[in-house]
Structure formats: structure tokens, C-alpha cells
Image (spheres, rainbow, N blue to C red):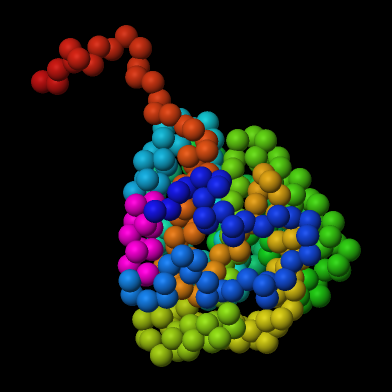
Amino acid sequence: MITTTKEGPLKRYGIKGGRKLSLGHYDPDDTGEYKKNDQGKAKAKAETAKLIARLDGLQERLYANATRSLLIVLQGMDTSGKDGTIKSVMSGVNPQGCKVVAFKTPSKDELSHDFLWRVHREVPPKGYIGIFNRSHYEDVLITRVHGWVSDKVVKRRFDQIKEFEELLTENGTAVLKFFLHISKKEQKERLEARIADPEKRWKWNSGDLEERKLWENYLTAFEDVISATSTDCAPWYIVPANRKWYRNLIVADRIVNVLEDMKIKTPSEPEGVDFTKLRIV
């Protein structure tokens, strides 16, 4: 049974910031206490279903009270499962109180402002869950890997990002950040699956092959990002994502944990109404 508390077993994927990080020490094929077979998969899926059911009720309270909000950041290599995570974990959430934003190449207007300008506009308002499919971290990842900005600029942006996320948390927005960790071999298989399946070919982007050549550069960039920007108020979780069912379990567990920590109660009944005597005709 998964215990969704800060002391729960899935807390171990949380990262303490400020320390040198090596992603090589984290197994993307890890499944924790669940066996890598049909039985373990079924058990994990059953636990995830319970968490999603709890998430539904917690989100309803969040929306009804409109005093807090939650921002979920999803990052990872191409094919790491950002879309799949959203589809699976948020399947029980009322779309009315949830907003997904996918950050693409900045427009001319966005480039005329600071790099956080377009991001701040998309932060979820109180009562909402916001999901960033890629995020402000692209401005310290792809820009660095391709040499579009200097290391000096990147380090300055690390500090600006931490200050930005601290501002959000101080104003009632909890921040959860997930790095979906897959192996290079797993990425190869997922790219090949896109080629083989006509229903998946719409996802194909020839640029993914060029980015794959920079795999080690991206790993180094992610290591620096996670180490520099994982904080108590906005933690990073390194999620083993080779097994989609275990990835979904970890993400669902941590989301439920944060929402439960908010201790949001159902709003009070309207004053002056005696519901025991109320009759609808």
C-alpha cells in the first residue's frame, strides 16, 4: 500500500538541491518494490487508480476553495512520456479546473521580453492545477546545449528561476517538478515504434534524431539544472520512466501528497439555509 506522505516510499525520488548530481546513479528501469512482471505491473496500476480517484476529490476541493493552486512541471528527453503522463495521471481530473501548457519555440513578441515573461502569464490561478509540458527550463537546457547562451547567463537564470518559483510558492502556488528519466535504449525503441505505427507517426519530428546525437550533452545539462534548482519549496523528482506504469504511480503519488498537505476542506455551507428543510418542487 502506498502511503502518500512526505515519509512515504516514493519520496526517495526527490532531489536535495545544491549537490553534484549524476543521472548515471539513477536507474531509469527501476520499479521500486514492484516486480518487473505482469503481477507487479497490475499491482502498481491498481495503486495508481486509487490515487487518481483521490486526486479527483482533492482537485474538487482545490477548485471550490480557490485559495491555493498547483503547478506541475514535466521535463525529460524526447519520448520520455510527458504527454502520456498527463493523459494517464490526470485522467480523473475535471478539465474545468486544469490547464495544460506546452511551451514551443518563443515567438518574436515573447523574445522581446525576459525569458520568464511568457511563463508567468501561464501560471495557474488559485483553484487550478496547471501543467507545463516543457517549461521555463527549456531556457537553461536547449539554449545551453546548442550554445545559444553562455554558461554565465545560464547560472544567472538558475537564480532567477529559483526566485520566480519562490515567489509563486509564497503566493499560494505549490510547485512540483518531474524529470522523466528514460534510457537511450528505451528512447530508440519508442522512436522506432513511432515509425512502425501509422497511428503514432503524427508525433514524428526529424529533429528528434539530431537532438538524440546530443544525448550526453543533455544529460549534463539536466544534471546541472536539477542540482541547481531543486529547493524545499519547489523540489525536483527524478522519475524512472522506462516503465510507464511505474512512472505514473510516482507522479500520481507525489501530486496527491502535495494536495493533501494543503489540508483544504470542503467550503462551508451558505449561511441562512436549513438544508434539512429544503425541498425541491
Q: Count the marks: how many?
A: 0
Q: Position of residue 273 (x, y in %)?
A: 28, 12
Residue at far left of view:
281
On screen, residue 76 versus residue 37, left or right, reads right
Asked if the magenta segment contains residue 45, the reply would be: yes
Asked if the magenta segment contains residue 169, the reply would be: no
Residue 9 seen in the current view: yes
On screen, residue 43 versus residue 17, left or right, reads left
Q: Position of residue 280 (x, y in %)?
A: 14, 21
Residue drawn at (52%, 36%), measured in percent from left and top? 262
Front residue of 54/99: it is 54
Front residue of 122/74: it is 74
Does residue 133 sit above or below 143 in this rendering?
above
Q: Position of residue 136 (x, y in %)?
A: 68, 58
Residue drawn at (47%, 32%), measured in percent from left and top? 264
Residue drawn at (78%, 64%), measured in percent from left and top? 20
What secondary structure is the magenta-colored segment mainly? helix
Q: Position of residue 109 (x, y in %)?
A: 70, 58
Residue 124 sits in quarter:
top right
Magenta extent: 40-51
Residue at far top of view:
272
